[in-house]
Amino acid sequence: VHCRPPGPEKPTEGARGAPVFARRLCYNEDMENGDDPPFTPSSLRRRIFCLLGSLYLSVYGVFLALRLGDYGRDALRHFAFLRRWLGLAE
Amino acid sequence: MSLLLLAAAVVVLAVLRGAGGAVVRRLGGDGRDPGLSLAAGYGVATLGVFGLALLRQVGPWALGAFLAALTPPALRFYRTCPEARRLPWPPPAGSASRLAAGLSLAILALGLIQALAPPTGMDSAVYHLLAPKKILEAGGLESDPDHWFHRTGGFYFIHLLGMGLGGEILAKLLAFGACLASAALAWSLAERARPGSGALGAVALCGSPLVSSLAGHEYLEIPILMYLLASVQAGVSAAGGGGTLLAGSMAGFAIGTKSTAFPALVLILGLAGLPPFALRPRSWRHGVSLAAGFVVPAGFWAAWNWASTGHPLYSEYSGRVLSGAPGPSGSLFARGLSSVFFPSIHYWGESAGPWVVLGLLGWAVLGGPRRAGAWAWLSLAGIAFYFSVVGLLLPGYLAVHSHGRYLAPVQLAFGIPLGIALLDAAGPRVRAFLLASLLAPAALMALVKLPRSLVAAPVVLGLESRSAYLAKKIETFEAGERLRAEKDVKLLFLAARGYYLEVPWVWLNVVGAVSTREELVRRIRDLGITHVIHEPSGILPVPLRDPALFDGPPFRTLGRWPGGVRLLQVE
């Protein structure tokens, strides 16, 4: 008994040069036929994505900043524990 | 002592990984994936220890014999699979991957320090370590419907295995093993999606608010995530019916870990090959294997609850929320949904993080690649299914700020391959944008984790006692310790972390829905309560949070601690 299954040691190359096993991560008809269609989003789509993504990250950042107050208070509480343990504070 | 326990944990985890690897191989896989093998080993141990608990044989000898029984197949597996004997550490390529690997290791190392310290996590000391402690004290599972801690979740049997063999720290380390398995699975799934991206997959998991804040604590969302990733890994690599059986059983263990893991059910659609969720071709034969693998791991705990209480689910907390909370409204739904996409207010960390959301956005806006479609549909279906069920069955729960936590395992399991699939498909600028949204929050989460780990370090290194550490971290700890010297105590614990109590006690759920002081005093007299520990925190039903309830006779204050904690004697 050996742990390596029968078959080629290295993945074979797909049509776009990427290893074929990467395409098998999820199933669709194209993969069954050997390849995933080329993915080349237009420049406009890329710009829209970066714009919407930046907007989302900005709003996320605001929420995170609000949470940072909690994180900061917790950090200060723990640093106070450390200072007390080290004998630097009563 | 910590080193000894660490060594014991390595041995137990190695046995579980080896036994799991043997199961994976028996089902047609190769067993080389360390995360999948370890998850399968956790599954085997969960069912085995559950069986011992039913037989009321959970002492150290029985648990040791169970582990010894797993050792020969584990050794056979290691003997025949040399790759499993090496530490899996493929060198990360590129500066982003190196940084990702470093951040992942840093977060896991900080989590390990917390795992080696006595438990301080809120839910750990309310449920996740208390239930195994009670089951151990009782010698096994009890069918009395009032014993709520015998009615909870599947992964508790891993905690029980550790606690029975070596105490609470070994239990914590076995729980931490699920973090390691999850990180390994995220690594291998990312490698499958885009060769060379393993470290990015690992940091998408380790740097998420959910994993970075809960690593080292014993929250059940991490095992749910591990089993989901293992199911996905088994599902996408399964060659035959055995692999589908394994994928189904891993999905079943995810559901069986905790009832709030139900959004994970959407994975069954993907494993069954139903478009647009299909992760693999549709086949009736595989469908039968999937169902056969799923049913026992998903249902054993519900079957036990049904046999002993008449209900498949037991949720004392949901009952309280339902009884006291308002119905659904637009604002509550918006608050619930926002906790999935943004850091919400009341919990430390519970969402999957911004990177997964950006993956969904990228798939929607960029329009591909097609191999990302199933992951995106599964992710969206998980969110829709969760809120539909909660809105229909538990509308009051929409007011609770924990939706991100209940959905994050699903979001991470499907979002990691989704985001990775986008990385090599959208050009250098989009790639840089995605990498920044992945690495910057992970660095922040590592920083946030640092102070808690530093405070835990002295007790881990043996420079501070367990009681001194717990006294500063747990407000009710000293009140409980003071009672140890008293005789004939029956304590009413109106607080959160009952794990530390060493006297006979009842929890707040036995008091029931009291609304006046007279009712409370009458109930306390009926129950024969001698002492009360009161912590006016959010875990209590609203009427019991009022400190004035305990002012004056028949209550006498014996001590006060920070946070309004009081130890009271009933006269």
Image (cartoon, rainbow, N blue to C red):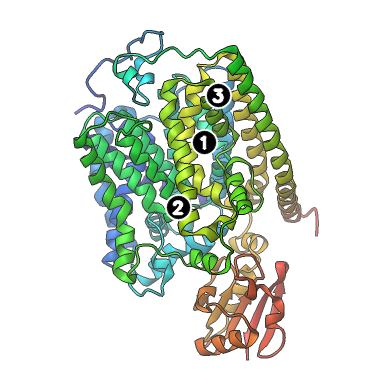
**x and y percent of residue B90 in the render?**
45, 23
**x and y percent of residue B301 in the render?**
33, 59
Q: Which of marks 1 and 3 is nearer the N terminus?
A: 1
Q: Are marks 1 and 3 in contact (CB under 8 Å)?
A: no
Q: Is residue B132 left or right of residue B298?
A: right
Pointer 1 and pointer 3 on the same chain:
yes
Q: In this view, does A77 lie above or below A48?
A: below
Q: Which of B332 and B221 is in front in this view?
A: B332
For image coordinates 59% across by 63% down, the residue present is: B326
Q: What label sits on residue B365 in the rendered view? A: 3
Q: Can residue A64 be seen in this view?
A: yes
As drawn, which residue projects farthest toward the right?
A: A89
Instruction: Give the quarter of the figure containing the C terminus of chain B.
Output: bottom right
Q: Is residue B546 left or right of residue B322?
A: right
Q: Which chain carries label 2?
A: B
Query: Real-space Cα distance between discs 1 and 3?
Result: 24 Å
Which residue has dot 1 on it?
A: B205
**x and y percent of residue B9 in the render?**
42, 47
Q: Which of marks 1 and 3 is in front?
A: 3
Q: Which of marks 1 and 2 is in front?
A: 2
Q: Mark 3 lies on which chain?
A: B
For image coordinates 34% across by 71% down, the residue present is: B309
Which residue has dot 2 on it?
A: B389
**x and y percent of residue B264 in the render?**
41, 44
Amino acid type at mark 2: Val
Q: Which of marks 1 and 2 is nearer the N terminus?
A: 1
Pointer 2 and pointer 3 on the same chain:
yes
Amino acid type at mark 3: Val
